[in-house]
Image: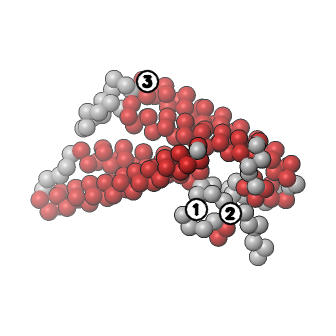
């Protein structure tokens, strides 16, 4: 149940990232054409593009985290016995949960500080910009907790205990690692 809900949420995030990128491209390109061709422009496009970029970055980091798409190395962990892999997996997830807490606390403070402050052009509360950090930290923590739960309850295969995957080991579009051993090239 929780897995299907997360799948739906992350499909929504991917869709929102596409919309944000398309909006940025249209606004920036349209502004360039208007400035050089018609000596005018869209005032809001620069600020809104910046906001969309921030939100797209945080959403993209969430999607990459869930897909285990961030850079890393598995040179040591892949050679450990299953118990060692589980210890490293749990330790890494606890450290990432702490980082999520730090990010949440900082984003919460910035959101609260900027609640009454409006942006220069759009005149929208700056809290919306900092809320991207809140969303990231909460969703990342949920993903990490779900993975820890899967490990504790034995639902995580040994191959999934290694958080880094080569792009060849994961079929395109599959958000979860494949139970195949690493290639020996």
Residue linked to disc 2: 178
Task: For the residues labelled 2 and 3, say whether their Cβ atoms are less than 8 Å apart.
Answer: no
- Relative to 149, does residue 42 appear above or below in the rendering? below
* Viewer-closest of 82 and 61: 82
Front of the two marks 3 and 1: 1
Residue 150: image x %, image y %?
71, 45
Residue 139 lies, with reference to residue 63, above or below; the image says above
Question: Of tags 2 and 3, which is closer to the observer?
Answer: 2
Image quarter where the N terminus lies is top right
Residue at (45% x, 49% y) in the render: 13
Relative placement, left or right, of 33 versus 102 is left
- Quadrant for the C terminus in the image: bottom right
Indicate whether 58 appears above or below 178: above
Which class describes the residues within 10 Å of circle 2: few (<14), some (14-19), or many (20+)?
A: some
x and y, in percent, of residue 97 in the image: 65, 37
Count neighbours of disc 3 (C-alpha within 10 A) and say few if under 14, some if 14 to 19, many if 20 or more: some
Question: x and y percent of residue 45 in the render?
Answer: 26, 48
Q: How is the image coloured?
A: secondary structure
Left or right: where does residue 5 sit relative to residue 183?
A: left
Mark 2 to mark 1 CA distance (whole Å):
9 Å
Question: Whole-percent x and y of residue 138?
Answer: 55, 36
Looking at the image, which residue is at 58% across and 62% down? 174
- Whether residue 160 is visible, yes or no, is yes
User: Contact (CB < 8 A) between labels 2 and 1?
Assistant: yes
Precedes in sequence: disc 2 or disc 3: 3
Q: Is residue 178 left or right of residue 36?
A: right
Task: Report helix, strand or loop for mark 2.
Answer: loop
Residue 174 has which mark?
A: 1
- Numbered badge on residue 112: 3
């Amino acid at each position: 149940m929780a897995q299907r809900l997360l799948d739906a949420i992350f499909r929504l995030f991917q869709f929102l990232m596409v919309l944000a990128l398309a909006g940025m491209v249209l606004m920036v390109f349209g502004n360039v054409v208007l400035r050089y061709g018609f000596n005018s422009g869209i005032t809001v496009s620069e600020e809104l593009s910046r906001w969309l970029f921030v939100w797209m970055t945080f959403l993209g980091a969430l999607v990459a985290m869930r897909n285990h798409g961030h850079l890393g190395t598995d040179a040591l962990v892949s050679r450990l016995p299953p118990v060692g892999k589980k210890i490293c997996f749990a330790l890494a997830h606890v450290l990432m949960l702490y980082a999520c807490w730090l990010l949440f606390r900082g984003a919460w403070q910035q959101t609260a500080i900027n609640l009454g402050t409006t942006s220069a052009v759009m005149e929208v509360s700056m809290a919306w910009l900092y809320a991207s950090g809140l969303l990231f930290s909460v969703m990342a923590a949920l993903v990490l907790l779900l993975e820890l739960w899967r490990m504790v309850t034995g639902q995580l295969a040994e191959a999934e205990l290694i958080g880094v995957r080569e792009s060849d080991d994961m079929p395109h579009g599959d958000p979860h690692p494949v139970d195949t051993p690493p290639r020996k090239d």
